[in-house]
Image (spheres, rainbow, N blue to C red):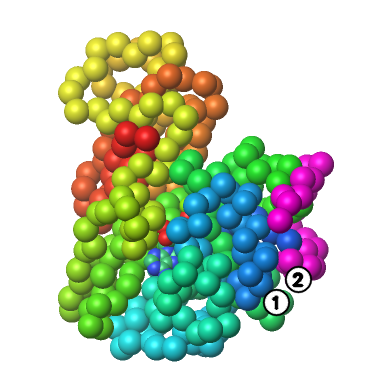
């Protein structure tokens, strides 16, 4: 199948137009609270296949299906274990994806041949309204070329996909800023495949128990677990020692403030206030901002490994991993 090229994606808030394009089998970028998604009709195998082409995404990496409510989610899965229901009731709409056995209506093109589907209800007014208008769910991975930093604004999507999609639904900046927590179930016990804003502590509080999947680079359960992912063009180096000088073709991303006495031209502070939620919200914008300058290297500090901080550090480590 050929990939259609467009003059330039429109960026606007026209829900009718977005719904029409999606109904016609086209891909449209949509805002969510985590990151922007590249959406298509999840029941249409051809539309879903377009997503892989546009993103240059390997076929083994399944898509997340977005629905407007828990009731809708129930239509596309065959089982909803008790713990899944508890988590959905507590965190939907919100940054949590549940991996559950799929119904046959969800094509294998969406799940990369798996018998399970990752499904979530995003917390974003525009996208929830859009989902309510449609009579199908939306398959949507993050709206970036495979392996690159996820987009947290309409401009980020435009930067990289402008001629590959007709429309970007503009919902402002994503307020969580990192991708959803992905949770599967083994013997009914929740297993975290990808860390996110819904933390393991939060899941344990509700389900009493939680496991963390170990990393794997081949045939991963969630390719968000690929060691190298979410990474800019520049080399990313995590700060483990005091760095005296940063060259003009390098950049520095600090957690709260620059080290005393450091002079650096290309800098970005994640959260001057030391707020981990602000750091999550700004991480990808910071990486993109510095990467746009064509730097050879970006130094980055890790944040405190507590709560959502562990999820931020997870993304920082993957962005710094050997490509
Ligand atoms: O926050 C998010 O989850 C964003 C927004 C757009 O919803 N989406 C997102 O999608 O991050 P993506 O494609 O970049 O990452 C989806 C991850 C992939 O690593 C994929 O393998 C995993 O979800 N996934 C999807 N279905 C799965 C399944 N059945 N079993 C295991 N992992 C699955
Ligand atoms: Mg992604």
Q: Residues within 10 Å of mark 1 (few under 14, many from 20)?
A: some
Q: Position of residue 275 (x, y in %)?
A: 33, 46
- Contact between marks 1 and 2 (CB within 8 A): the answer is yes
In the displayed structure image, the side of residue 209 where residue 128 appears, left or right: right
In the displayed structure image, the side of residue 288 where residue 271 appears, left or right: left
Q: Residue at x 27, y 31 (%)?
A: 238
Q: Residue at x 63, y 76 (%)?
A: 43
Q: Residue at x 62, y 39 (%)?
A: 160
Q: Which mark is residue 58?
A: none
Q: Residue at x 30, y 15 (%)?
A: 262
Please identify the quarter of the rendering in which residue 215 is found.
bottom left
Task: Give the mark, 1 or 2, whose residue is nearer the N terminus.
Answer: 2
Q: Which residues are magenta?
A: 1-25
Residue named by callout 2: 23
The residues tagged by marks 1 and 2 sit, at their Cα atoms, a distance apart of 8 Å
Residue 188 shows in this picture:
yes
Image height check: is 305 above or below 116? above
Image height check: is 20 above or below 299? below
Please identify the quarter of the rendering in which residue 282 is found.
top left
Image height check: is 310 above or below 86? above
Q: Which mark is residue 134?
A: 1
Q: Which quadrant is the C terminus positioned in?
A: top left
Residue 168, magenta (yes or no): no
């Amino acid at each position: 199948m050929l990939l259609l090229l467009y003059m330039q994606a429109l960026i606007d808030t026209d829900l009718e137009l977005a719904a029409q394009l999606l109904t016609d089998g086209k891909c449209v970028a949509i805002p969510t609270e985590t990151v922007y998604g590249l959406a298509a009709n999840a029941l249409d195998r051809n539309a879903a296949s377009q997503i892989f082409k546009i993103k240059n995404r390997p076929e083994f990496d399944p898509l997340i299906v977005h629905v407007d409510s828990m009731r809708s989610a129930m239509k596309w899965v065959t089982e909803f274990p008790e713990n899944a229901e508890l988590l959905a009731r507590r965190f939907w709409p919100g940054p949590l994806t549940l991996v559950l056995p799929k119904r046959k209506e969800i094509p294998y093109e969406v799940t990369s041949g798996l018998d399970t589907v990752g499904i979530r209800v995003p917390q974003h007014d525009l996208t929830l309204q859009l989902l309510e208008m449609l009579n199908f769910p939306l398959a949507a991975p993050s709206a970036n070329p495979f392996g690159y930093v996820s987009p947290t604004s309409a401009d980020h999507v435009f930067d990289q996909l402008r001629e590959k999609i007709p429309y970007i639904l503009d919902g402002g900046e994503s307020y969580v800023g990192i991708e959803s927590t992905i949770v599967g179930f083994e013997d009914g016990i929740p297993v975290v495949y990808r860390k996110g804003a819904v933390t393991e502590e939060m899941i344990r509080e509700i389900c009493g128990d939680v496991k963390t999947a170990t990393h794997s680079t081949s045939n991963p359960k969630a390719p968000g677990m690929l060691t190298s992912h979410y990474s800019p063009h520049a080399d990313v180096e995590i700060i483990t020692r005091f760095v005296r000088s940063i060259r003009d073709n390098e950049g520095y991303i600090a957690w709260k403030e620059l080290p005393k006495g450091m002079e650096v031209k290309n800098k970005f502070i994640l959260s001057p206030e030391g707020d981990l939620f602000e750091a999550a919200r700004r991480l990808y914008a910071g990486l993109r901002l510095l990467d746009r300058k064509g730097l050879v290297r970006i130094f980055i500090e890790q944040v405190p490994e507590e709560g959502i901080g562990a999820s931020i550090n997870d993304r920082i480590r993957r962005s710094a991993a050997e490509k």
